[in-house]
Image: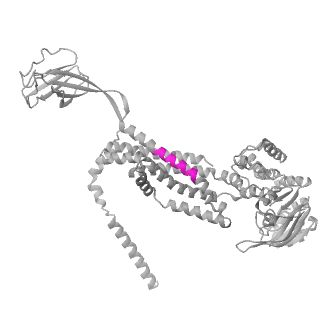
Amino acid sequence: MLKIQNLSKTYPNGTQALKNVSFDVKDGEFLVVIGLSGSGKSTLLRCINRLIEPTEGKIFWDDVDITAAPPAELRRIRRKIGMVFQQFNLVKRSSVMTNVLSGRLGYVNPWTSLLGIWAQEDKQRALQALDRVGIADKAYSRADALSGGQQQRVGIARALMQDPKLILADEPVASLDPVLSHSILQYLEGLNKEGITVICSLHFLDLVHRYATRVVALKDGVKVFEGSAKEIDRAKFKEIYGEEAQEVRAASL
Amino acid sequence: MPVSRIVRNTLITALVIAAFAVSYRVTEADFPRLFRDLPKGRELLTAFLTPDVFTRDVETRTVSIVFPIPCGSAPTEESLPSEGPRLVPSVLCAEPLEKFTLEGFDLQPNSEVVIRWRLPDGRTMTAIRTQTDANGHFSQEVQARPIQSTVDGVASRLEVDTLTPVGGLKPSQALKDVTDNMFVTIFMALLSTTLATVIAAPLSFLAASNITRKGVIGTFVYYLFRSFFNLMRSYDPLVMATVFGFWLSFGPFPGFLALTVVTIASLGKLFSEAVENIDPGPVEALQATGAPPLHTVRYGVVPQVVPDFISYIIYHWDINVRISTIIGFVGGGGIGYYLNLSINDFKWHQAGTAIWAIVIVVWAMDFLSSEIRKRLT
């Protein structure tokens, strides 16, 4: 159970990205966060693993206060939270294998891994993770030799290496060809079915309807909706995204 | 146009003209002199353009006859041979300063001939030089020694050396020295670049804002190393070399140290800028996995900056070869020092060899470094 309580974030330049946002995420949910670009979705996801320090508010995960965790404790918490990014965030010049293995850095012996030495067990695990997303044959390619969809699958494999209880997916399909969206989200859905909680930000209404077990909507940093995906009809969608969103929505549907 | 602007523009124009006038005066610019002194420059240039590069081995053969001065002071040659390499003078003895003709037969063809006197005490005095024709013959008027040269009944001898170039071209001493010194310069540059890299690479991460500039301590460390690099960069390698030269006496070592210090500063700055220009995404991703900070740098930053680092290192090696040439001039050893010595000794051909070597090596390094850098992506 993840509890987000009165979360606010104000950036040093004065931008208020989040305003007093509260909601709970039960274990095993596939929670989708929707909202316009700049509505605070990325900030919200990054506050959960404290890639961004919230200004106010608390986040509890199984009664542990993430917001109060000292650095070492925070790293132990982060180990259990996988993250998938819009831009994949792979090291382009490193091999796929190295990128996937790096997901394990929170667990392994710090000295040998600093030298780039990995246990056979970890390599095996990485190959399994790659196999799971269907690109085991690319293990020794350079990451930037892969297509966008394949790179995102490497991103998922890297998150899998963490043996996560929670996956944060920050617009995982926004940089991909729309036809690839389902293939990526199906992997996340598969993990969700195995009991991993997923918090995912998305743009397209059809994808929200298809995958979300519950939806939180943000508008200008304020939570404007929380409920099931079915409750979001076109009228509600327009309310969240504003009048100008019509064409975008029509195109995506 | 308002008057104030006209006044201002006039003033600025006047100041600019004055600045140029002063510059012209202090540099003592005298362009016509370039043409007036052309012969001097041409002589120098010709010497530089004909560097001392190759020599050939010379085989020396000597034939000699007894030749008393004056006649009667000692016995003359009893009989001159009629075949084989031989000398045939028009007279068998001569009074001081008497002129006679000396002919040589069946000597080495097309060779330089040195005709000289060998005095009874063993000393030699070169009389004249000439050349044999294709048949190994020469004919040359020779003047006898101005004083009596017979001592204790031993007559002086007339000796002829034929100098024949044999074998192929081989590197001259100057070329060997230039090569040796060039290696000193190249390896001085290599070693200083390597040492500077070892020191600058780790420090550059501390001077990169995206790595260290967090919190009070981080910001302090960042400014400390950033200003350290900037401060060291502001010293010219020549000044450094002079300082180290007085400290450690002149030679390659102080030159090497000066180069290292300057390279640390320069590479440190370049490296830290490369680190600052990375894609922050992978770093964020690694932080999210719970990786320790050092590992985030090792796996997220290092792979991204390696091509830039290598490119800068090679580029700097190239620069350092050039700088160490200049450092040599102030006593830092290597090719610069050799060139300086050659010029001071008026050995223009030898200096030409050094200049050509510098041109070739700098060009080669430049070419090599750009080729290697092209292949790094």
Q: Where is residue A147 in the image (x, y as percent from the top left)?
A: 75, 50
For the point 37% across and 46% down, the residue is B339
Query: Would you place residue B257 above or below residue B9 in this image?
Result: above
Dominant SS of magenta comes to: helix
Q: Which of B7 and B205 is in front in this view?
A: B205
For the point 62% across and 65% down, the residue is B220
Quarter holding residue A203: bottom right
Q: Is residue A172 shown to the viewer in this render?
A: no
Q: Position of residue B282 (x, y in %)?
A: 72, 56
Residue B166 relative to residue B289: left or right = left
Q: Which of A174 and B237 is in front in this view?
A: B237
Residue B9 relative to residue A148: left or right = left
For the point 73% across and 59% down, the residue is B284
Quarter holding residue B204: bottom right
Q: Position of residue A65 (x, y in %)?
A: 84, 65
Which segment did they paint magenta?
A: B185-199
Task: Judge whether residue B189 is colored magenta.
Answer: yes
Task: Judge whether residue A6 is colored magenta.
Answer: no
Residue found at the far bottom of this picture: B3
Query: Would you place residue B56 above or below residue A213 in this image?
Result: above
Q: Where is residue A26 in the image (x, y as percent from the top left)?
A: 91, 62
Q: Nearer the viewer, residue A36 or B298?
A: B298
